[in-house]
Amino acid sequence: RIYASSILPSDNDGLWQNIPAANKHIEAVCKALPNCTFLDLYSGMEVEGKLRPGDSLDGVHLTLLGYYHLWRLLAKHPL
């Protein structure tokens, strides 16, 4: 079994606008592969296209709270 996850949101001004399109490509590739499950983690971690406040100090790397939110999202997906 293959699990492919979306790219998480970012507050990086040069990056965050491209993430949704990249995630659509990842999802499409996953759908084309047998035994591939796409995990949409982006939708649960973003607010207006960026990481939720408190989930990151620098807009890229997760804080302890950010990892807590990430693991709660992962727990919803049966592996």
Image (cartoon, rainbow, N blue to C red):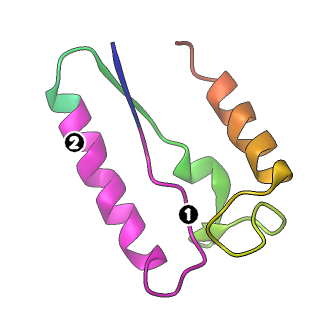
- The label number, if any, that marks residue 9 in the structure image: 1
Give the side of residue 37 with respect to residue 7, left or right.
left
Horizontal and vertical percent position of residue 14: 44, 86
Cα distance in 3D space between marks 1 and 2: 19 Å
Quarter of the rendering occupied by the N terminus: top left
| Residue at left offset 25%, top offset 33% | 30
Give the side of residue 62 with respect to residue 33, left or right.
right
Q: Residue furthest left?
A: 32
- The label number, if any, that marks residue 39 in the structure image: none
Horizontal and vertical percent position of residue 50: 61, 71
| Residue at left offset 64%, top offset 48% | 44
**On screen, 2 above or below 21?**
above
- Please tell me which residue lies in front, 61 or 30: 61
Q: Earlier in the sequence, mark 1 or mark 2?
A: 1
Question: Dot 1, how many residues are within 10 Å of its Cα: few (below 14), some (14-19), or many (20+)?
Answer: many
Start and end of the magenta stretch? 5-30
Give the side of residue 47 with respect to residue 43, left or right.
right
Secondary structure under tag 2 reads: helix
- According to the image, label 2 marks what residue? 28
Would you identify the image quadrant in which residue 47 lies? bottom right
Secondary structure under tag 1 reads: loop
Q: Nearer the viewer, mark 1 or mark 2?
A: 1
Residue 71 on the magenta span: no
| Amino acid tagged 2 | Ala
- Please tell me which residue lies in front, 64 or 42: 64
